[in-house]
Image (spheres, coloured by chain):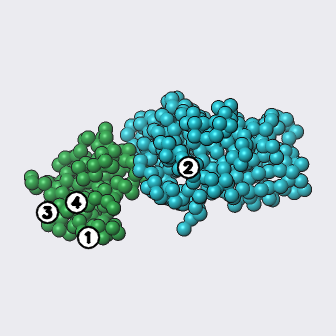
Chain colours: A cyan, B green
Amino acid sequence: MGQRTPLYDLHLALGAKMVDFGGWDMPLHYGSQVEEHHQVRRDCGVFDVSHMTVIDVSGPQAKAWLQYLLANDVERLHGVGRALYSAMLNERGGVVDDMIVYRTEAGYRLVVNAATRDQDMAWMQAQLGDYQVQLHERYELAMLAIQGPQARNRIAELVSQARGALIHQLKPFEGQADGDWFIARTGYTGEDGLEIVLPADQAPAFFNDLVGAGISPIGLGARDTLRLEAGMNLYGQDIHQDVSPLAANMAWSIAWEPAARQFIGRAALEAERAGGVQQKLVGLVLEERGVLRAHQVVRIANVGEGEITSGSFSPTLSKSIALARVPMATADRAEVEIRGKWYPVRVVKPTFVRHGKALI
Amino acid sequence: MSEIPVDLRFAESHEWARLDEDGGVKVGISDHAQEALGDVVFVELPEIGKVFAAGEAAGVVESVKAASDIYSPVSGEVIAINEELGASPELLNSDPYGAWIFKLKPTDTSELDALLDAASYKSAIGE
């Protein structure tokens, strides 16, 4: 038996098909993964993401420590409520994890992946050194993501006036506390929406209110196809300890300036950049019928080979798409081997869908 | 609990077989199989004229989750394929016993007797 979120019983009551995800028993879907996907793109839906790890960082040197720990620079968070996406690298420049960092009244809040929790905590503890920093893992909190074009309007109607006002005020990539709730305008779907961190004992009633108000519960299956269409990396698949952010479409999240900021992995990334980055993460589109899957081989004429890191059927585009790591010289065409046959694919920028619109 | 029609025979690999009045055998996947697969998004159909032995891989059903081989429950030659699945693969989810995948001219109809009947299939899937 895996770990359970506070919403486990509700998932069962809603008919969820449960699966193991990083040691947690989580809903895969509640009937149809494809319908749930469309629901989020067209209207909105609610995800239980309580398995994710929330870590509060405080202390007089919290900022300096995060500037050392992370590839992005928390100096960029001008004011409480601002958020940024960052990789946490090892000395070799490989990705230990990716996360969102919020600046809070007391310091910073990190939201990291579920499956990497132990490795993250061990890594962070090992990097504390003499920094005057406290790490506080918030086991007692649950987290819901409400995503889709109607998400903020719908949620604002179902919460207190003060929280509704806050939801309307939040700009993209901002998160603010309201009492014991933390409400952020972030997500993992390529749509507008919210992520709400709240005490675990309040989560079932809130989730019930949302479902009662007609907001569909959405499982991990649709979460995966939504993030894939949005071109967002999944830790453990598209990125891991041996992958550089420069080969994972994450160069934008590395703060090179100021040059004097010595973050973990910086030297390795600079050497990689100086020597020429060898690989890149691209999008693939299969025009024929079939489904691209992780680990299928990609062949690029006169260039070399690569590999699919994530692949599935895109419900929005009604065709199969994938993320693939390929040699830097790859242009706009490639082939993928599916069950011994080679299929032509288009190579595109790895953002397939944003705000309900196809980009390819 | 999934639906299991009593007039069909089942393979342990979750295909169903139906003997038609014209002597042909239609093949599809069970309600239990479609539910386990999740949303079906692509069906790779066999070619007409191909001959399969019982238990041989004859096609592939891809769902959002994974690709699964479809095994021919009896031996025979493919005499028809359900072209409708090309445009509407989701029929395997919505109507698993109506949406046949291919039709065989069986080599030996007695092979059907070696397949599971509805009651045996029901216990094979633990229902």
Closer-to-camera residue (A328/B30): B30
**Left or right: B64, with A279 as reference point:** left
Instruction: Say what amino acid the circle numbered 1 marks.
Output: Ser
Pick the quarter of the image with the N terminus of chain B: bottom left
Closer-to-camera residue (A151/B120): A151
CB-based contact (under 8 Å), mark 1 and mark 3: no
Residue at point 19% right, 53% down? B26
- Residue A207 is marked as 2
**Left or right: B94, with A339 as reference point:** left
Instruction: Say what amino acid the circle numbered 4 marks.
Output: Pro
* Residues at discs 1 and 3 both on one chain: yes
Question: Alpha-carbon distance for marks 1 and 4?
Answer: 12 Å
Crowd rating for badge 3 (residues with CA inside 10 Å; few <14, some 14–19, many 20+)? some
Crowd rating for badge 1 (residues with CA inside 10 Å; few <14, some 14–19, many 20+)? some
Q: Closer to the observer: label 2 or label 3?
A: 2
Of callouts 4 and 3, which one flags the residue occurring earlier in the amino acid sequence?
4
Question: Alpha-carbon distance for marks 2 and 3?
Answer: 54 Å
